[in-house]
Amino acid sequence: MSTLCVPSQVPSVAEDCEQLHKAFSGWGTNEDLIISILGHRNAAQRKLIRQVYAETYGEDLLKALDKELTNDFERVVLLWTLDPPERDAYLANEATKRWTSSNQVLVEIACTRSPKELLLAREAYHARFKRSLEEDVAYHTSGDFRKLLVPLVSSYRYAGDEVNLTLAKTEAKLLHAKISEKAYSCDDIIRILTTRSKAQINATLNQYKNEFGNDINKDLKADPKDEFLAILRATVKCLVCPEKYFEKVVRLSINKLGTDEGALTRVVATRAEVDLKIIKDEYHKRNSVPLDRAIAKDTSGDYEKMLLALLGHEEA
């Protein structure tokens, strides 16, 4: 479901590396050349480019980019160039270090990735930071947030489609009872959301709506200012309808007074090869404006060009 425009005739990796090296040489940096290469290569191609660049020039491509680029453009290019598990490890580490109760990045990584992708991100975290993701999450969070986030980032859910409907009915009743008691951080709610497969959670939440008339997230909105409830709602959304979650993140990042480039960059860089096309459709449906037009209106320069390249909207 990639939106990425990869040219049908891709130059050789050696040629890409030579061109990138050229983009950093001489007077000034050739940003357009960087975008025309990295903005149009898939994860496997980018990984190979990094490898060959290091072998040829004795320098990590990320270090070269870091030296030459600045600001939002630098961040989107660096995030994009990282291998997806490394990128998730980097974002998760950043989220633990700057953690506040309104930060939903850890939920996003734990719940929108496949079980295998989350496992790879945790391995990449070990390799890069010489610690585990769960120990950092546990160290930097506390109370109910820790109670939810540690099992979320540690989980290895079943990824199949099989569903137990009897269990879904039982757990829908259980969720409703606990939410009615306002026992939002009770063991059962946490256990269900952090261990059940996405298919099973989906079935449980459908039963919840059929039986009790409301979406669970509506019942979790009892206190709009409660940040733990907000993170529970984000968990549910990321597990069952990630494209709606990401559409909202993008919409808020653009519609705020001033753009929240951090959120916009993160969503475009992490979803371009996953479900950005669905997020774009969702955005268009919800806001009656194509996402590429909204981004073009709200950003500028090389940052805008790179985002649009990843949105797959200009010609490859």
Image (cartoon, rainbow, N blue to C red):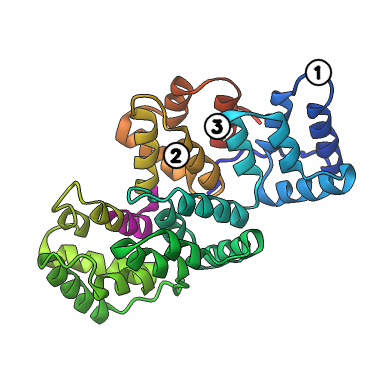
Choose mark 3 or mark 2, whichever is in front. 2
Residue depicted at x 63% and y 37%: 77
Choose mark 3 or mark 1, whichever is in front. 1
Residue 172, percent across and down?
20, 72
- Depicted 216 relative to depicted 308: above or below: below
- Depicted 20 relative to depicted 80: above or below: above
Q: Which residue is tagged 1? A: 27
Q: Specify start and end residues of the magenta stretch as a single range.
A: 233-243
Residue at the top extreme of this rendering: 27
Residue 250, percent across and down?
40, 37
- Mark 1 and mark 2 lie on one chain; the one further toward the N terminus is 1
Structural distance between the alpha carbons of marks 1 and 2: 32 Å
User: Does the magenta-highlighted stretch encompass residue 83?
Assistant: no
Q: Would you say the residues marked 3 and 1 are in contact, meaning their CB atoms lie under 8 Å apart?
A: no
User: Does the magenta-highlighted stretch encompass residue 234?
Assistant: yes
Question: Is disc 2 placed on a helix, strand or loop?
Answer: helix
Q: Which residue is tagged 2? A: 263
